[in-house]
Image: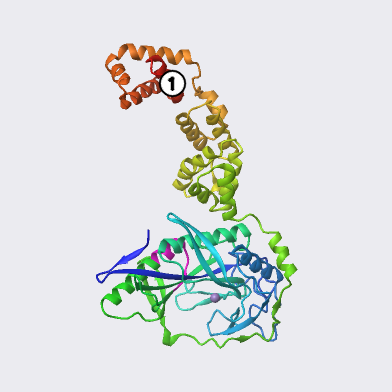
Amino acid sequence: MTYLIEGETGDWEVVIGLEVHAQIISKAKLFSSAATEFGAEPNSQVSLVDAAMPGMLPVINEVCIEQAVRTGLGLNAKINLHSVFERKNYFYPDLPQGYQISQFLEPIVGEGVITLDMPEGPRDIGVERLHMEQDAGKSLHDQDPKRTFIDLNRSGVALMEIVSKPDLRSPAEAGTYMRKLRAIMRYLGTCDGNMEQGSLRCDANVSVRPVGEKELRTRTEIKNINSVRFVMAAIEYEAERQVKIYEDGGSVVQETRLYDANKGETWNMRSKEEAHDYRYFPDPDLLPVDLTQEFVDEIKASLPELPDAKKQRFVNDFGVAVDDAATLVADKETADYFEAVAESGNAKLAANWIIQELFAVLNKDSLGIAESPVSSDDLGKLVGLIADNTISGRIAKDVFEVMVTEGGDPAQIVENKGLKQITDTGEIEAMIDALINDNPDQTQQYRDGNTKVTGWFVGQIMKATGGKANPQMVNELLKKKLGLG
Ligand code: MN
């Protein structure tokens, strides 16, 4: 299922590389001890280093280095024991130093890989590098009609910039890549992945080429996209824009563009001629980062089980379908919730109930699994009641509805509402006898092997018992009564 853009001259392929800025989870900033908490009063978390006061010296925060290494290991990437911080020079009002401390020629993490679960099968996307750098401050344009204010709380906050290879071939793959990267970092505890708060931002490099062409064509970069949905929409728009340019006989200009989510369009921010020459050079205030292999090995030994491994375990140990397992491990809370429900003894049933019934309830009110109105304990009990034939799957839906709206213990709800499955075969046999007696035509058709009529018989019994009969039992009894068993 290749994603291609149909043009008048033929089909076009889209080539995408993503640069993701991920805020490192750390109490203090990359080179200062100022706090990093989101939403604080403007300029209340700014040290003299962050404000770039003369004579201030940066001191590296070891926690941030650990987090970058941890993330690199989670991406199966090469960890560079020797890396160097450099100054990236440019002027901007929210950058008091006049340069950003970043890594350039020698990043802390080299090549790695992220595996995507696509509907057509797994896809390995290369990671080019991961480097550490400082975030800038923030310009506030909406506080005053005439003036712009600067909030330096974010100035100096530690970021990881994770650069993919140009391996992505569709907006859907780009979206899946973002979600997978975010999931891995959340499992690792290295980035909270909160895109609304700006902890995760994406720049997308997009180019197109006729199917079969080997060379990459000129790319444009869409900057600072702040939701997965927008990443996909921006790429789709931009790729189609470029195809149109080529087909109209023009050429794509290398430029930086911004995505306007309201209009669903990208627009030019600056062209290549206006591009900065950053004049990188090693920061003389900072020594190179030299790590020992023991330091890296210790972090490696402490890594949690990551989504891919967890997915494989759910498939192997619980017999969950691969697609379902991929859905369940997409975030750690859901995976934990599933494991708790699976303790009921029927993991497949647990997976189905979470993915079909619970997700429907959560999606309806845009709730996360942590805000689920039904606890994993209670859902486990419900699944247990289905598994041991106390109630049918059909009745379980009614019980679940009560659990969602009123809460309560499923066994208690079943008891109170008299929903227990009828296990007394005599009662059902009597109903079947009556049904056969009253409906000779249908009975003959059943005997002749009309499967539709089989369903009708089962339906009648289910209706008569308010769904409390066990459909399988009804089927068996029917066959027996009609001499077909
Ligand atoms: Mn950057």
The quadrant of the picture showing ligand 1 is: bottom right
Whole-percent x and y of residue 258?
41, 73
Q: Is residue 468 visible?
A: no
- Amino acid, disc 1: Glu
Image quadrant of residue 68?
Answer: bottom right
439 w.r.t. 452: above or below: above
Image quadrant of residue 71?
Answer: bottom right
**Residue at 43% over, 54% down:** 119
Image quadrant of residue 342?
Answer: top right
Tell me if 429 is positioned left or right of 112 in this view: left
Say which quadrant the N terminus sits in. bottom left
Q: Nearer the viewer, residue 114 or 136?
A: 114
Q: Is residue 251 visible?
A: yes
Q: How many marks?
A: 1
Q: Nearer the viewer, residue 261 or 411?
A: 411
**Residue at 57% over, 75% down:** 137
381 w.r.t. 285: above or below: above
Say which quadrant the C terminus sits in. top left
Whole-percent x and y of residue 431?
40, 14
Whether 225 is among the magenta residues is yes
316 w.r.t. 130: above or below: above
Whole-percent x and y of residue 346?
56, 36
- The secondary element bearing badge 1 is classed as helix
Residue under label 1, please give it: 476
Whether 207 is among the magenta residues is no
391 w.r.t. 85: above or below: above
Whole-percent x and y of residue 13?
36, 69
Q: What is the basis of the colouring in this image?
A: rainbow
Magenta stretch in the rendered image: 222-234
